[in-house]
Image: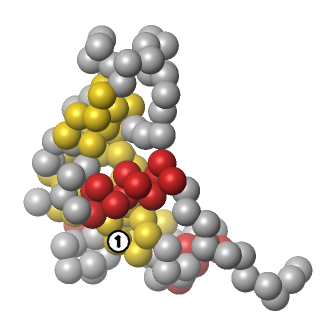
Amino acid sequence: MSNIEAPDVRDEGYDDWLDAVDAGEGFYLECENGHGSLPPRRVCPRCGATDLEETPLPDAGEIETFTEIAVAPPSFVEDTPYVTAVADFGPVRLTGLVRRADGADLDGEDVAVGMAVSAAVGESETTGERALVLEPR
């Protein structure tokens, strides 16, 4: 293994999307048939349409499923324990860390299916990289 750190590389589509979420301007891509998907995309994954428009992400979603992670992969080892969830935001589903607006993690006992959440951007304690966060409303 090398001690050389990898340079910060910007994933243009994903990082641009995180920038938009962080600025309160989150969006998803919608085709003419009403299917939603997340960028980066050039084609609707459901019907193949190529005319995709940025549509504002709903302000709130609902947790569909969640799990509390006690043993994490190396890229999240310092974040443990933490809760990750999938939330329904209408035409799209988002997967993120569940944290309060002040950045404090929640225990699995504090999270429930059906809980209203909003999308935000936080940071991994292990790597310092940005991550999608689902904040209870």
Mark 1 neighbour class, 10 Å CA radius: few under 14, some 14 to 19, many 20 or more = many
Residue at the image position 44 percent from the left and 17 percent from the top: 50
Q: Where is residue 122 in the image (x, y as percent from the top left)?
A: 35, 71
Q: Is residue 111 visible?
A: no
Residue at the image position 37 percent from the left and 58 percent from the top: 18
Q: Position of residue 86 (x, y in %)?
A: 36, 47
Q: Can residue 49 be seen in this view?
A: yes
User: What residue occupies the far bottom of the structure in this picture?
Assistant: 3
Dividing the picture into quarters, in which one does residue 3 lie?
bottom right
Residue at the image position 48 percent from the left and 66 percent from the top: 69
Q: Where, quadrant-wise, is the C terminus in this rendering?
A: bottom left
The residue that label 1 is drawn on is 122
Give above or below for 16 relative to 102: above
Give above or below for 91 relative to 96: above
Q: Where is residue 74 in the image (x, y as percent from the top left)?
A: 65, 74
Horizontal side, residue 6 vs residue 38: left or right = right
Give above or below for 64 relative to 104: above
Dividing the picture into quarters, in which one does residue 22 lie?
bottom left
Horizontal side, residue 84 vs residue 7: left or right = left
